[in-house]
Amino acid sequence: MGNGKWSGPVGGIVGAPIDKVWTMVSQTKKLPEWMQMVEQCIDLVGEEGMPGNVRLVSGFMFPQLDGERSWIKDRLVSMDSSSHSYVYRMEASNIGLDGSLNSLKLVEYGDDSTLVNWSFEINPIEGACKDSIIDYLGFLYKSSIN
């Protein structure tokens, strides 16, 4: 991308109609249902689905040396139900991904299937291997799509 960020796309097909998938992925309270490594997701500030909404996500997304749960506070940047897409920014965490931008977009794929396109852009992490981080994030997001 030329901006010094580390980025990657992840995609997959879900065997369900787009409106059913959108209902699942666009609601904070449903995040633990489709992201198995997430234990809890709660709204902190603002209204769900509205730009500025801040939520706290916690679970075992990123293993911690002390065995504690990882946590992320993210802010919804935009959500467009008509195009089945949203963007959120990780604002604070104990995992080193502060400032990363994540986008999710759904596309009708036919036969009551939905194509899920998820992309991420993160600031380089000092001392980390770029390819390892991108591969791990790709694995997390792909497992959630599956």
Image (cartoon, helix red, strand yellow):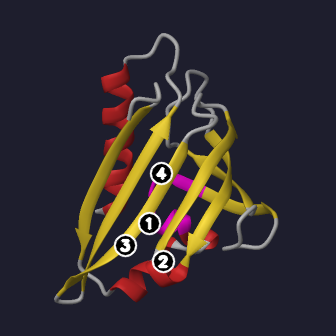
Q: Which residue is drawn at 44% across and 16% down?
A: 128
Q: In this view, does 35 lie to the left or right of 70?
A: left
Circle 2 SS class: helix
Q: How far apart are marks 1 and 3 (CA)?
A: 15 Å
Q: Distance between the residues labelled 4 and 3?
A: 22 Å
Taking depth in this image into account, of 32 and 45 the one nearest to the observer is 45
Q: Residue at x 81, y 67 (%)?
A: 46
Whole-percent x and y of residue 115?
A: 27, 71
In the picture, which quadrant includes the N terminus? top left
- The residue that disc 3 covers is 106
Mark seen at residue 37:
4
Whole-percent x and y of residue 42?
A: 72, 62
Q: Earlier in the sequence, mark 4 or mark 2?
A: 2
Number of residues whose C-alpha sits closer than 10 Å to that of mark 1, classed few (under 14), some (14–19) or many (20 or more): some
Mark seen at residue 34:
1
Q: Give the range drawn in magenta.
A: 31-39
